[in-house]
Image: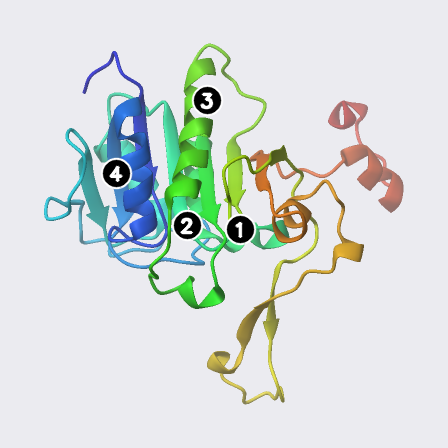
Amino acid sequence: MNSTQPLIMVTNDDGIDSPGLHALVDALADLGEVVIAAPTTQQTAQGRSMNGDRSVSFVRADQRSWPEGVQGWHIAATPALAVRHALAVLTPHRLPDLLVSGINYGENLGNNITISGTVGAAFQAAAQGVPALAVSRQTPMDYHYHYGDLDWNAAAGVTRRWVQRLLQVLPATLPLPFDVLKIDVPDPCPPGTEERFTRLSRQPYFISVMENPSQTAPLSRARTAIQVDPQALDPGDDIYAVAVDRVVSVTPLTLDCTASLADTVQLLKLKLDDSLLS
């Protein structure tokens, strides 16, 4: 590997043949040394699951058309497991400077993001010391599990700009104040669309709807729908940005899921060592 260039690992949760992945690779190919480590097949909604065929290894994706110098690999595993294995066997002697997960078919917003394989792959990289971006494009629901014919230029352009910004500050500013940058691009996203820093909404964006529920109802009877109530949203959150104001949402995320210890102790009237609250 060329140590003089940034090493960028690219993954996704839609599989090695996803047009969103190919658009992402095309957008980043000249920014550094790009290594693709993607699931073989569609892995939407796998979160940070570590499932996969334990008998398989990475397979070169040479039959695909990649920009010159790009290495393409795929494996029959979930996105997070693909990333973990890639860091062990594809880049064993040098951690990537950055991992980019996407471009996902479908926005990842609000308190649903832990379901996302796109976000799960980014969190796995971050957990192993690699700063990460998780990038998603707003799409119709019909495209969340099946590739559709979409224009990826705007989402790819947004992603490229944010990768360039990060590469300008890495590695001098490590550790970063965030572990993952979650970027959601609205559809449409014409030139000049605002790019806004946001908080993660505590509201759900996708909800499960079931008509005539019963104990014998199969999982297949439930359908996923989008729920957006502008009155219940904070104007500073990611759902409001994408679904209401139709701007690009950039949400910094951390691996630390710890709630306030002081508030918890006060609420539950517990006596703990003061050192726990510092």
Residue 162: x %, y % from top left = 46, 28
Q: Where 53 falls versus 70 (above or below)?
A: below
* Cα–Cα span, label 1 and label 3: 21 Å
According to the picture, the residue beneath numbered tag 4 turns out to be 36
According to the picture, the residue beneath numbered tag 2 turns out to be 104
Sequence-earlier tag: 2 or 3 = 2
According to the picture, the residue beneath numbered tag 3 turns out to be 166
* Cα–Cα span, label 2 and label 4: 15 Å
Q: Which residue is drawn at the image coordinates 63% and 89% (left, top)? A: 212
Q: What SS does tag 3 mark? A: helix
Please tell me which residue lies in front, 188 or 114.
188
Q: Which residue is drawn at the image coordinates 60% and 80% (left, top)? A: 210
Amino acid type of the residue tagged 4 in the rendering: Ile
Q: Where 29 falls versus 169 (above or below)?
A: below
Amino acid type of the residue tagged 2 in the rendering: Asn
Give the side of residue 190 with respect to residue 56, left or right.
Answer: right
Amino acid type of the residue tagged 3 in the rendering: Leu
Please tell me which residue lies in front, 44 or 22.
22
Asked if marks 1 and 3 touch (Cβ < 8 Å), the reply is: no
Residue 132: x %, y % from top left = 44, 32
* Cα–Cα span, label 1 and label 2: 9 Å
Amino acid type of the residue tagged 1 in the rendering: Asn
Dot 4 alpha-carbon crowd within 10 angstroms: few under 14, some 14 to 19, many 20 or more: many
Asked if marks 2 and 3 touch (Cβ < 8 Å), the reply is: no
The image quarter containing residue 252 is: top right
Sequence-earlier tag: 4 or 3 = 4
* Cα–Cα span, label 4 and label 3: 19 Å
Q: Which mark is residue 108?
A: 1
Tag in front: 4 or 3? 3
Q: Where 32 falls versus 159 (above or below)?
A: above
